[in-house]
Structures are given as structure tokens and as C-alpha cells.
Amino acid sequence: MRFDDVEKPLLEATIGRALRAGGEFAEVFVEERHSLSLSLDDGKIERASGGHDFGAAVRLTVAERTYHAYTDDVTEAELTRAADAVAAAPRAAEPGAALPLGDRRDDRGLHPVARPPHDVAVDEKAALLRVADETARGHDAAVTQVTAAYVEGRQRVLIANSLGELVGDDRTRVRLTVNAVARRGDVIQTGYESVGKSMGFEILDEEVAAGLARTAAGKAVTMLDAQPAPSGPIAVVLANGFGGTLFHEACGHGLEADAVVKNASVYAGKLGEVVASPIVTAYDDGTLPGEWGSAAFDDEGVPMQKTMVIEEGRLRCFLSDRLRARKMGLSSTGNGRRQSFRHVPIPRMRTTYIAAGDATPEEIIAATDRGFYARSLAGGQVEPASGNFVFGVAEGYLIERGSVTTPLRGATLVGNGIEVLKSIDMIAGDLLVKTGMCGKDGQSVPVGTGQPTLRISRMTVGGTA
Amino acid sequence: MFETTDAVVARALARGAEGAEAYAERGVSRRIKVYEQAVEQLTAARRKGVGLRLLKDGAVGYAYTSDVAEGALDELVEGALGAAGVADRDEHAVLPLPAAVLPGLTVYDERLTAAGDDDKIEVALAVEQAAFDADPRVKVVEDTIYADSDTEIFLTSSTGLRGSFRENHCYTFAYAVAEEDEGVETGLSFSAGRALDDLDPERCGREAAQRACELLGATKCRSMKATVVLDPFVAASFFGVLSSALTAESVQKGRSLFAPLVGTTVAGPHVSLVDDGLHPDGLASAPFDAEGVPCRRTVLIEDGVLRGFLHNTYTAHKAGCPSTGNAVRGSYAAAPMVGPTNLILDGPTTPRDEIIAAVERGVLVTNAVGVHSGANPVTGHFSIGINGLLIEDGRLTSPVREVTLAGDIVGMLKSVVALGDDARWIPMGSILTPSVVIEGMSIGGT
């Protein structure tokens, strides 16, 4: 069977079979994904790989428990077996009921694709990597190594459930990343830049590739002159763009409703309370056209939405999927996402950002007598239960008497989500969204993170000086 | 699935490939999550698929499919040929020859296959109950998981290499949240084996609870140079990150700080680090690696001296040495890379009590945050967040939080002065390690 051959009667039969021994909700998720990845390393295109995934999952919820069975053999017999596997799960309940499936919703055109990547010759994609390699190496003699990767994917999903909903979504994503390594004597530094969209190949050309390469190389070379960062509490100015990963980690994960309903988030029970400085308003938005973290629907067939999570410092909304929304007595916010049919949907962010403020980046730097300027972050981790987080700084500088001065290496930002949000005292207007892959519970999904340049009046920097 | 792998290789050769290797997997798995003594989530999975690596005009192409039906296999071959068409020629891209003898190693236990869902649910419930029973301050066990998998591997290569084995394993995981006076701390633990009887659910739950509770009331501490004791959980995450710098792939691409250091001292004289793909207790053990080369034991660091790196067939050909059997792949969807199997940190040991007693001022680190993002295997620099217990005048005193630990990896390895007698397997990465004592580390606090 091919993806387009999966029809209503089979979906309805599978849902009915899954519910026959009881349950509140049953769903069939069918997915097909074609992907291509090319990577250049050490001047050579050496990893070229094409992939084809086709599979289906049956999910049943009974008294807030989830039973999930999947197969990558999409046949009537295997779907029947999967439905039987969830129906046989140990429990006692009344038979469940399913509504007949309604008309299929697709909402095509929310994230248009001008040049489907599949129609573009592989050589054109490979050329981008070679341009990135040459540009980064040509940028500065200190650049000794470059890796670049191109990834494209087209994921089609078909979601049918016992509420009678039938939803299709067709998602195309394209991404190019460049990593540069610079060396001088014993000092090695790395720089990274990327672009990714829920759009087609139209977002990329050789000029874009060269621009990413110059930025990545520039970061690596600049950091060669970096001094060891000092340790201790200090004012921190976070630059726009990648700085948003701090909000994603330090706050966003704590707003995901799976942690909230288990009371394993510091934000649990705090709706309406002040969790941030009054100048902070923040959103999680799956509707931004063409953004990397956007789609027409989430992976439970709920339309994506723009969700205000913090309004002028007060906590307004959690990010939920169907299951957690039901537990909280609310509606899903369209945050039920899954890496693939092999994973169950869980609450996940889409594009999370702090809204623009009134200041300019220059004013913020000028108003800082002594501080740490984090231009780009390397990634980090948080414990949602406590809100404690730690972040590596990829590119950082000292701020002295209102000016950005010495580059600093090896700095880590350590703090607590709510404490840091409350300490934000200046926000600029230069909102910028960056893309990444977010991992949680063994699932990786595309997300956007963003923020304008902002200042945290005081937080702990860990360095080696 | 030899019928699939044989057919794929034959078609690739018929379409003009100089060499081809098909790697197929099929298997079943279970994942059970319990919460407040009831099943919260149960996943039953059936997986299969095939990956094709081929050589065409001296370049490598890779493609995979989860669909092994007739038409899809032709698409697979065309996909790999298309990929090879854009890749650069590479003289070191060769497929391994069949081994004379494969190690006789069993990594399959039929007792796990015989176990039913009810038994597995019981195990998970016992883990969670043990966490609650261990300490009343454990209010939530956010994650309690039982998971297992049973996988058969089939490999056919145009070099004549043809092999298959079956592997299964199971594990439990607990992530406990403890609360007291507004303070919240978390702790985790694992248990792993190849049969339910190998698991220790009570210890897994109890330990997760203890690890959370002992951090309650943590405060920030002053910045200082001090001795740190990494407990086996933290040591394992460190050595896991470090191992990527000990692969020949990193070395050959100029991405390893260890590249120029073979034959030199890179760690304290107490430290030996071995990769052992045949260890009878290692969950990463297998008769052959991801491209059919027999697994073996490889010494990386011996008494503090760097002896060598991990190789697959590609890096070995480039370096002019034999493969160490360290080709790895996450699944059939990925071409082989280089990576560790079971890592074993070994050396003379000291009783853990004596280790603590000998520290005048330091920190016993029981939790490290940001090791993967904060430790850079290229530059050797690391800066991570830690939690743990202060050690003052040879005694464990109060818990500390929001503390950073920073330095360079080789400097830290050289400052290892002792290993504990508490070595254990940490299943995340399959690492056997004791507590590690390091002198003169920079601790960043207030």
C-alpha cells in the first residue's frame, strides 16, 4: 500500500477495532517521509543519503492512559494487528464509541513551497556546500576546517480519530548549516550559523550559503582572541536571535503541559501570577508563515495557533496537547507534536519568542557599565521541576563602561528560569527568530527560538579565569 | 531478511555499483511508562527496514527505506546511486572483507522474549513504589520507564561478508522529584540487563529518590579551587563525551584535541580507558560491528598514556591499520560512523569512604547539567553546571547548586588522583566507571 492508497474505510475500521474493548479516544496516524541529506566535511561531500519512511501508528487513550502501537509495514493486516495490540492492553472499561470520519481538512497554502526540493537537481544542492566551504576558508587564513550540511524533507501525514476528524498535512522543510573551525597556535575555536524554513529550495542560493559561511567563519576567528571569561554574578546582555534559546530552555519547557500536570514544573499552579518582569510578553507560535517550527496542524490534527504564554510578566497559558488539555479541562493549544509515527505526541514548543520592546540594542549596551554580552549561545539544558538551567556561550564579550570590548571564551550561564525572567530590565525592538532541533523524551522536532536584544540585570556566569 | 539484503546487493551490482552492502533490521520493542501506580503509556512497536551503502565510480552513496516491498527496493538502489553521484570520490571508501572467525558471543536471552506485558508492568510499578517508599519527600516520580527491544540484524556485502545475529535487552529508568520547604530537586537512576531477572527495580527507584533528596536545601557556594569527586553517573557522562574525541574520525578531521598526543601522558597514572565490544556484561556487545567487522577489546588509555583511537574500516584504511570493530550506526537509516561500544574506566581503586575522608575541601558531584553542550571535544574546554554535596574536612556536609565546573579536559584527566571502588555500569552509553577524584578544579559560585 502507498500513502495515497490509505482510505477512509480502513481508517474507520482500525479506529473501531482499537476502541472495541473500551477507551475515550482512538487515532490512526499515517506518515510518509522522503528525505535527503548531504554533508561536506574536510572539503569533500562524503555523506550523501536518501531516506524513505512509511509507517502508521494506532493510539488509544483510556482513563488518561495511552496505548500506542506502530508498524512500518502499512497493510490492512498490520493495522489490524496494531489495533488489536492497543485494544488488548491490560485494563477494564466499557466499549468506546467513534464518530464516522468527516471530510478531510488540508488547509494547504499556509506555508507555500515555491520550489519543491525534490524537483531540484542534486548537483545544485551540492554546489551550496562547496560554496560554503570555499567562502569560509577564504574568509580568513585561520579557518582550518569547515563542515556544512544540507537537509531536505517532505513529510506527509494523515490523521484520523474517533471524534470523526480527518486531517492531512504536507510539510516541506529545508535547512543549511555551516560550522567553521579556526586555529591559531594551540587555540581552536568554532563558529556556527544556519538557516531553515518550512518552505522549499527557493530560500537557498549560493549567496545565502556564502553569507552563512562568512558569519560562521567570522565567529570562529573572532573567538581566537578571546580571553578566559571571569566567574561570578554580572549583568548579562543577550543578543537577538540565538539568545532566544535561553527562553526556550529556561522557561518554555516548564510551560509544556506534561510537566505542568505532573506538578513537575515550577510554573504549575502559577497561571495569572507574575513570573517575569512586567516588560516581558512572550508567545509560542506555530502559524508564522514558512517558519521552521510552523505547520498547518500539529501531529494530532489540531490547527496550529499563536499562543500568548506571558503577558506583561504574568503567566497566561500552558502549551498542551489533547491529553494534557483534557486533564486540565482546557482545549489543546495545538502543541501536540511527534518526531514520527514511532513516537507518541507530547506537548512541544513551535516557535517561542519574547516580543519586541522599546529600546535599541545600542541603548542597552550603552546603559551597561560592566556586563557580559552573549552574542550567541551554544545550547543548554534545564530541569523543568526546579527551573534551574545551564547554557554554554559560543560567542561572548565583556561590556565595559557602555561598550563591547574583549571577546571572552568558555563562559557558561547558570541560573533559574523565573529569577532570570524577573531580572529582565531592558528589551530592544530587534526581534529575530533562529531555528534548531529540540530534543525531549527521545524525540527531536524542529523548533524556532527568538528574542530581541535584552538585558538581565544580574545572573551567574561561570568561567575559567 | 537475508532474502532482502541479498536481493538489494545483487540489484545494486547489476546497476553498475562496484561494491554494495545491505544492512537490514527487524525487531519488536516495548516501552511502558507508569505514573502514580498505573500505566500511563504503553508502546508496542514492530520495526523493519534496510539500508544500502554502495560504491559507484569511487564515491559512496547511502539510502534507506522502511518499505521492503518489491518496488521500494528499486527506489532504494536508485536513491543510493543518486547520492553516490553527488559525493566526492574517496580512495579510502572500501567495504570490509569477511572475517576468518567471528567471536562466539551470545547477546540474546530467550527469557526476555518469554516475558509478558503484565510482568513488565510489574517491574515498572516496583521501581516507582521503591522511589516513594525510600523517602516521604519524594512527591512525584515524573518518569518511571520500563523498555526493551529485540532486534535481528542481517548483513550482506558484495565482498562475500554475510552475517546475522539477534540481540535483546531491557532497562528501567526513574526520575524522582523531591520537595521540602519550597526547594525542589531531582534525581535519576537506571537498571539494565537482558532479562527481567537482571533488573533491580527496588534499587533503581530507591536510588533515584536518594539522589533527589540528598540535594534538598542546596545553596550556592563560593568560587574556589578544590577537589571534586565525580560519582559514576557524572563520570560516565564525561567519558561519554570524551569518547567522541577518541575516534579516528575526529582525529583525521582535525576535530580532536588528542590527535597529536598518542604515546604521551594524557591522564593520571591511575587511569586506563578501554573499549570492549565483547564484554559479557556490556549491553553494547555484539559479535560484529555495524559493517560486519568482529568486535574486540581496544586499549585507548593505559596507565595514563594515550595508546590509540577507535577505527572503522574507512578510518583504518586511511590510517593504514586494522579496524578496531567500532563501526556504529543508530539504525538501518544511517551509514556507519565510528563510535565506542562498551567503555571501561579502570585502574587501582580506593574505598569510597577513604576518598571522601581524604578531601579537606571539595565537592562530591552527583549531577552535571550541560555536559553535551558545555564540553567541547575539539578545543578540550568545558564549562558545565553541577549539583552535589560539599566535602569539608573529610565529611559530606551541605548540598550545593548553581555551581559551575570549568577547565580543560586533558588538564582535568591529568589531575585524576584516585578512582573509587564503586565501579558500575551506566547504561546511557554503556560505560563501566567508578567515582573519579580530581584535584585543583575551578568551581564557580558566588
Image (cartoon, coloured by chain):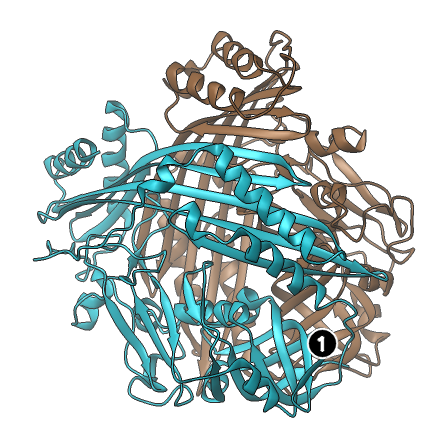
Chain colours: A brown, B cyan
Direction from residue B130 to residue B243 in the image, left or right:
left
At which x and y percent is residue B267?
41, 86
Q: Residue visible at 34% across and 60% down?
A: B281
At which x and y percent is residue B248?
30, 70
Question: Could you tell me if residue A341 is visible in this image?
Answer: no
Q: Residues within 10 Å of mark 1 (few under 14, many from 20)?
A: many
The chain carrying label 1 is A
Question: Could you tell me if residue A431 is visible in this image?
Answer: yes
Q: Pick the residue in front: B416 or A334.
A: B416
Q: List the residue tagged with mark 1.
A: A461
Q: Residue visible at 45% across and 86% down?
A: A186
Q: Quadrant of the N terminus of chain B?
A: top left
Q: Quadrant of the C terminus of chain B?
A: bottom right
Which quadrant of the structure image shows residue A74? top left
Q: Pick the residue in front: B426 or B310.
A: B426
**Kind of residue at disc 1:** Val
Q: Is residue B364 above or below residue A2?
A: below
Q: Is residue A6 above or below residue B266?
A: above
Find numbered disc 1 in the image and state the secondary structure of the residue it sits on: strand
Number of callouts: 1
At which x and y percent is residue B407?
56, 83
Q: Is residue B378 above or below residue A13?
A: below
At which x and y percent is residue A310?
84, 47
Direction from residue A349 to residue A275 in the image, left or right:
right
Q: Pick the residue in front: A129 or A393.
A: A393
Q: Pick the residue in front: A35 or B321.
A: B321
Which quadrant of the structure image shows residue B293? bottom left
